[in-house]
Amino acid sequence: MLDGFGQYPFHTIYVKMEDDKKLSKMVKVMRLKLKPVLKGFEIFKTTYLSDPHLTIARRMTEAQFNQAWTEWEKRKFSSSFNTSNILLLKRSVNEIDFQPQGNYKVVKHFELTGQEEKEQLTLF
């Protein structure tokens, strides 16, 4: 369930998501499954979302952010949607400063079959 708007420092505005136990459980299971795979990349700090959200604006100037947030923070918004799949995306990073560059590319397409995690997550 999508419910309201929030903001992060560095001028980002997003749609908040209600705490969804299924989504939180999926992230927890994925972290456990991916930990051994990502172990060899200690140079990079692995981060996981602790608060799922949908970014709607980012990297705004301070003036743009202040104007936008003044309007968006008061707006009411509530919605929901169903999905049957998710995409794992990646993009390149600059080897010097490790800043993201280029567009995201699809790594894997996952069907959400409704099966128990034990069966469904064996693909990791």
Image: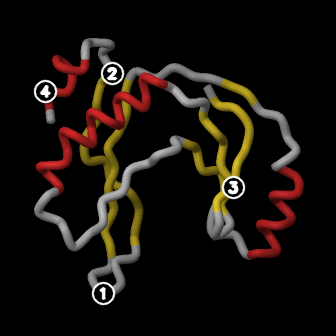
Q: Amino acid at mark 2?
A: Leu
SS label for mark 3: strand
Residue beneath label 3, please? 7
Drawn side of residue 105 relative to residue 14, left or right: left
- Measured Cα–Cα span from mark 2 to mark 3: 29 Å
- Measured Cα–Cα span from mark 4 to mark 2: 13 Å
Quadrant assignment, res 12:
bottom right
Q: Amino acid at mark 1?
A: Ile
Sooner in the amino-acid sequence: mark 2 or mark 1: 1
Residue beneath label 1, please? 96
Residue beneath label 4, please? 122
Residue 104, percent from left and from top: 38, 57
Residue 105, relative to residue 51: is it above or below?
below
Sooner in the amino-acid sequence: mark 1 or mark 3: 3
Q: Are marks 2 and 1 in contact (CB under 8 Å)?
A: no
SS label for mark 4: helix
Sooner in the amino-acid sequence: mark 2 or mark 3: 3
- Measured Cα–Cα span from mark 2 to mark 1: 37 Å
Find residue 112 and name its label.
2
Q: Residues within 10 Å of mark 4 (few under 14, many from 20)?
A: few
